[in-house]
Image: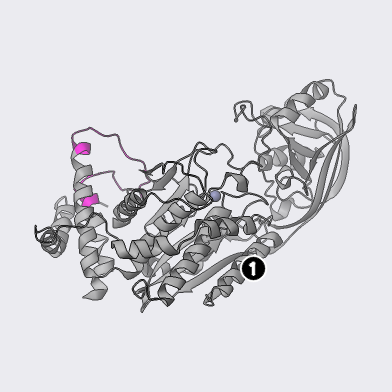
């Protein structure tokens, strides 16, 4: 659909007429514009209350659970979160359940089967005897959704194992298949299609070879119609693989696998907690995925723990009247990643109208030195320009200047930056063209421990938790409390940052930013986006007349 070329300009001028005179008035010499959008006393109240040490304690609590989507361990983790919310006087809490059985579909997602796993062991029986994995010691070494049973057979290596070419000239029937591809795809090719006993996944040669003892997280993601044929998957480290490789080549390596587990129907559980605002028609969403393997810490016990500490800190500050009463509701969401968020958004189409913004916290506790990482704040996509980007960037600068550390945390440099939109977590679904709630993500990348046994609580830093927690809390409280004057102050910032981006791009001085576009939408990082970012502030203004 084409629109008149003058429409973006018209939108921008309408917005400028509405906001700019007041914004400019704020810049008069007698009343200098504050550097930061969040008032300093409010920021300091949050800094004083928010505890990185408490957040770290919650991380320790949540990592006890093997909290796979739709599985009993997930229910254990969300009960743990709910118990803590109640203990802090946050009783406005609800759990919504969505059938998940490897068959029921939510948009493009099929909800996974539930999985009750008690134990799983993989042994070499010949030519020597050695245990390669025990689930109760190292939960990630058993592939998620492995079926129960006992198997014994000779090993065969098929390389990648995810396509037919891997199996040409190889008879894998009644053998244990070793491969380096994703467990779910290898299991489907080797076991479901070709009658192998099960799969053992070793790391691809180029996957973090400098860390030979990493055991990676992997899943079979068996669908309901595959259940009867489904067997097992295990993961081994690079070092284990190097030792076994010559034995496999000789055709004499014999393994025994035993798994005590069941695949069954379950539910995706989405937990909401509310701190209600005076205007029930508007809310700010804070979301974190609660699922993952036992001991998994930064991904994403850190985000889930941070949500709990944000809720506690804001409740305390409200009770003590140290921050203004909320106009808009703070809505906290603990979700099973992707699957639960999609199911929940389908049930709640009104979120598109009600939610003014969403903050997604995923991997927010990294010790920056131990993980060689950086905090990335992913902007909304170019198809959804928003004031939200300018707000969180401004608050991040305020956090950096505050130079926060936690009593038992590191004194690492606060290394952060704004990045173009990147997909990969629950902010995707909010930014999606069918929902259009502007969502930013706080997360760390790179992280060499990601999806391995080394993503454990020793890589989490209470200083990082405090910095990101204060950043998210101050942003959320601003979104929930801002009055017209504060919105106008942010408008000045949005205006100047939009134009600062337009001119270098127009002159070809910057590369095309990342982001997705709706069908038929052209990338025009220009006046149209600036206008839309400015217009997005109207959602905060209109209710105040
Ligand atoms: Zn994650």
Instruction: Look at the numbered disc 1 and give the secondary structure of its residue.
Output: helix
Q: Position of residue 88 (x, y in %)?
A: 54, 73
Principal SS element in the magenta part? loop
Report the front residue among 164 and 241.
Answer: 241
Count of numbered labels shown in the rendering: 1
Q: Is mark 1 within 8 Å of ligand 1?
A: no
In this rendering, does residue 169 appear at all?
Answer: no
* The C terminus sits in image quarter: bottom left
Q: Position of residue 508 (x, y in %)?
A: 22, 33
The 10 Å Cα crowd at callout 1, few under 14, some 14 to 19, many 20 or more, is: some
Q: Is residue 521 magenta?
A: yes
Snapshot quadrant of residue 487: bottom left
In this rendering, does residue 86 appear at all?
Answer: yes
**Which region of the structure is painted magenta?**
504-530
Compared across the picture, whether 109 is left or right of 431 comes to right
Report the front residue among 469 and 235.
Answer: 469
Residue at the spot 54% in from the left edge and 74% down from the top edge:
93
Residue at the spot 79% in from the left edge and 48% down from the top edge:
229
Q: Is residue 338 above or below residue 213?
A: below
Residue at the spot 19% in from the left edge and 56% down from the top edge:
492
> Which residue, given by chain and number where applicable, does mark 1 sit on?
79
Snapshot quadrant of residue 513: top left
Question: How has the structure been colored for display?
Answer: one colour
Snapshot quadrant of residue 375: top left
Compared across the picture, whether 516 is left or right of 368 comes to left
Q: Is residue 149 magenta?
A: no
Report the front residue among 490 and 512.
Answer: 490
Q: Is residue 492 above or below residue 127?
A: below
Compared across the picture, whether 501 is left or right of 520 comes to left
Q: Position of residue 498 (x, y in %)?
A: 22, 48
Q: Position of residue 462 (x, y in %)?
A: 52, 51
């Amino acid at each position: 659909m084409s629109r008149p070329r003058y429409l973006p300009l018209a939108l921008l001028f309408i917005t400028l007429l509405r906001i700019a005179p007041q914004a400019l008035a704020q810049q008069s010499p007698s009343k200098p514009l504050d550097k930061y959008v969040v008032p300093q006393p409010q920021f300091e109240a949050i800094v004083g209350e928010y505890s990185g040490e408490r957040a770290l304690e919650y991380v320790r609590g949540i990592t006890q659970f093997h909290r796979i989507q739709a599985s009993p361990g997930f229910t254990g983790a969300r009960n743990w979160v709910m118990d803590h919310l109640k203990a802090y006087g946050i009783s406005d809490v609800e759990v919504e359940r969505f059938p998940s059985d490897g068959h029921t579909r939510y948009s493009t997602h099929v909800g996974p089967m539930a999985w009750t796993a008690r134990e799983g062991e993989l042994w070499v029986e010949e030519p020597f005897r050695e245990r390669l994995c025990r689930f109760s010691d190292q939960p990630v070494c058993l592939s998620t959704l492995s079926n129960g049973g006992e198997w014994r057979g000779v090993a065969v290596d098929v390389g990648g194992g995810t396509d037919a070419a891997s199996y040409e000239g190889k008879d894998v029937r009644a053998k244990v298949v070793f491969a380096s591809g994703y467990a779910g795809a290898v299991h489907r090719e080797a076991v479901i299609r070709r009658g192998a006993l099960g799969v053992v996944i070793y790391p691809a040669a180029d996957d973090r070879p400098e860390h030979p003892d990493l055991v990676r997280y992997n899943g079979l993601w068996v669908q309901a119609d595959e259940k009867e044929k489904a067997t097992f998957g295990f993961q081994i480290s690079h070092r284990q693989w190097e030792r076994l490789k010559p034995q496999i080549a000789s055709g004499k390596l014999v393994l025994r696998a035993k798994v005590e587990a069941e695949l069954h129907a379950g539910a995706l559980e989405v937990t909401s907690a509310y701190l209600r605002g005076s205007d029930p028609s508007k809310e700010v969403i804070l979301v974190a995925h609660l699922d993952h393997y036992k001991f998994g810490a930064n991904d994403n016990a850190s985000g889930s723990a941070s949500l709990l500490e944000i809720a506690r800190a804001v409740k305390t500050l409200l009770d003590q009247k140290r921050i203004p009463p909320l106009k808009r509701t703070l809505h906290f969401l603990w979700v099973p990643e992707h699957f639960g968020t999609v199911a929940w958004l389908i049930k709640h189409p009104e979120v598109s109208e009600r939610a003014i913004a969403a903050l997604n916290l995923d991997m927010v506790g990294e010790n920056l030195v131990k993980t060689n990482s950086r905090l990335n704040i992913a902007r909304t996509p170019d198809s959804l320009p928003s004031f939200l980007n300018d707000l969180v960037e401004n608050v991040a600068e305020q956090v950096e200047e505050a130079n926060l550390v936690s009593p038992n945390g590191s004194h690492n440099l606060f290394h952060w930056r704004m990045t173009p939109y990147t997909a990969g977590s629950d902010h995707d679904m909010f930014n999606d063209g069918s929902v259009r709630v502007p969502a930013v993500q706080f997360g760390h990348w790179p992280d060499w421990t990601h999806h391995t046994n080394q993503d454990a609580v020793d890589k989490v830093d209470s200083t990082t938790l405090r910095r990101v927690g204060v950043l998210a809390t101050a942003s959320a409280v601003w979104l929930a409390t801002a009055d017209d004057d504060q919105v106008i102050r942010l408008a000045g910032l949005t205006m100047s940052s939009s134009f600062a981006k337009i001119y270098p791009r127009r002159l070809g001085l910057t590369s095309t930013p990342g982001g997705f576009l709706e069908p038929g939408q052209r990338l025009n990082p220009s006046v149209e986006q600036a206008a839309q970012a400015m217009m997005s502030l109207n959602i905060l203004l209109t209710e105040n007349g």
